[in-house]
Image (cartoon, rainbow, N blue to C red):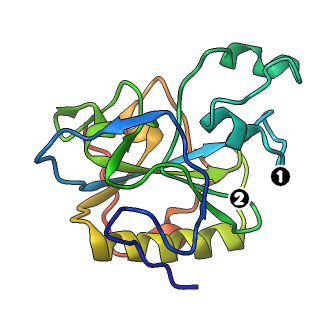
């Protein structure tokens, strides 16, 4: 599949599910980093609405004991790639999604300011699907065509000691489309 990033920062082929957990990027900041994450809610459960509900501020934290810690949490990502390869977009690439938290890359703090976040449905100690890698590659190509991306990093690279995703199950050789993986803080 081929993706097209429109001038407004939305991918034409993605399912658009806007999140309120975003704001404007600082002016004159180039979007030059792609950050890879993984998520499943509850952990190891796939295909439900919980991730979408979390990013959309609708998560019922009483539906499973493991969700209780997410009460009041305001996070999002630009994209989610489901296990079956479905691409969902929550935030325009022109806006700042709240995906990286306290983070640092190449001496720059606040990675949300200059990065695009891509979540893969999964856990950090299990493999991802062929469908996810195929969509990730196509998305990366489309993003590189639109923005001056210089590198790709794991969430764990920009927030070491705090985050572990996408973890050992993520095969970097299947994901990279010409962007160097940069682990420098």
Q: Quadrant of residue 49?
A: top right
Q: Please state which of residues 25 and 164 is positioned toward the viewer in this rendering.
A: 25
Q: Quadrant of residue 43?
A: top right
Badge count: 2
In the image, residue 73 sits, relative to residue 95, either above or below, namely above
Q: Earlier in the sequence, mark 1 or mark 2?
A: 1
Which quarter of the figure is the N terminus placed in? bottom right
Residue at point 52%, 84% (across, down): 2
Q: Which residue is mark 2?
A: 82
Q: Position of residue 18 (x, y in %)?
A: 55, 47
Q: Please state which of residues 142 and 8 is positioned toward the viewer in this rendering.
A: 8
Q: Position of residue 100 (x, y in %)?
A: 42, 35
**Horizontal side, residue 183 vs residue 91: left or right:** left
Q: Find the distance from the CA under tag 1 to the CA under tag 2.
A: 7 Å
Q: Which residue is mark 1?
A: 47
Bin the neighbour count of mark 2 within 10 Å (Cα to Cα): few under 14, some 14-19, many 20 and up: many
């Amino acid at each position: 599949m081929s993706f097209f990033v429109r001038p407004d920062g939305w991918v034409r082929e993605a399912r658009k599910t806007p999140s309120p957990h975003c704001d404007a990027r600082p002016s004159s900041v180039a979007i030059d980093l792609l950050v890879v994450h993984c998520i499943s809610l509850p952990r190891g459960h796939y295909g439900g609405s919980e991730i979408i509900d979390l990013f959309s501020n609708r998560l019922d934290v009483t539906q499973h004991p493991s969700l209780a810690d997410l009460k009041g949490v305001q996070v999002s990502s630009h994209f989610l790639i489901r296990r079956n390869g479905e691409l969902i977009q929550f935030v325009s690439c022109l806006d700042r999604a709240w995906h990286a938290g306290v983070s640092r890359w190449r001496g720059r703090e606040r990675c949300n300011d200059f990065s695009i976040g891509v979540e893969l449905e999964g856990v950090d100690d299990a493999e991802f699907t062929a469908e996810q890698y195929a969509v990730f590659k196509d998305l990366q190509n489309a993003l590189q065509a639109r923005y001056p991306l210089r590198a790709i990093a794991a969430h764990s690279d920009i927030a070491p000691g705090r985050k572990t995703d996408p973890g050992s199950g993520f095969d970097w050789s299947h994901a990279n489309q010409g962007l160097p993986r940069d682990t420098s803080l």
